[in-house]
Image (tube, rainbow, N blue to C red):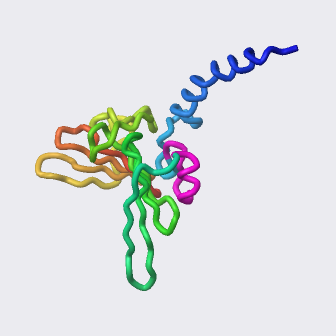
Amino acid sequence: MSHPWKSSRIAVASLPLAALLFLSGCSGGGDIQPGVGAAGVRLGDSAEAVEKVMGKAESTSSSGVHGAKEVETVYLLYPSRGIDVLLEGNKVLSIFLYNDGADDHKKYPGTGPSGISLSSKRDDIIAALGQPGARGLGLDSDLWFRYNNGLEAVFERDGTLHHLVVTRPH
């Protein structure tokens, strides 16, 4: 006869492994996957699918675009987890991953291709991903990079990341 405490000990012991696998992602490139998703949320997911993975949003922000047809955009905000999700027409359009303190968010803990993270600097991003397909120039520095694979990086003037955006490939 098996003791109930043995099976519960195994379940508890496997929790750190499950957390590690979740944070490291299954692809070997981290959980931030350009053009695909991050934090278990995928581009094209519904609001219900996002909430199934992330839980109820801490807050939301929405607006309607009027014209030939009305399209509602909704941001599901998770500042304590360092992530916001933009929905358009109830489908995930973009995922925003923030650095600590950026727009009152905690730092998103995940990693992306070639080990990039919210701790990466402008030069680290170029070393890992190469030259971007497009860049936004400020007075004395690059303010953002857009890669054709569906990853955007927005920087502070000192080269630290403000946030990353996972979006559709260009």
Q: Is residue 43 magenta?
A: yes
In the image, is 86 to the left or to the right of 4? Answer: left
Q: Is residue 28 left or right of residue 96?
A: right
The residue lying at 53 percent from left, 58 percent from top is 47
Position of residue 99 measured from the top left corner of the image (x, y, whole percent): 31, 39
In this rendered view, identify the residue nearer to me: 19 or 125: 19
* Placement of 64 over or under 13, stated as above or below: below
The answer to whether 91 appears left or right of 68 in the picture is right
**Quarter occupied by residue 136:** bottom left
Residue at image location 52% in from the left, 62% down from the top: 91
Image spot of residue 147 (x, y percent): 38, 51
Q: Is residue 114 magenta?
A: no
Nearest to the observer: residue 44 or residue 143: 44
Residue range corresponding to the magenta coloring: 38-54
Q: Which quarter of the figure is the N terminus placed in?
A: top right
User: Between 31 and 71, which is closer to the camera in this rendering?
Assistant: 71
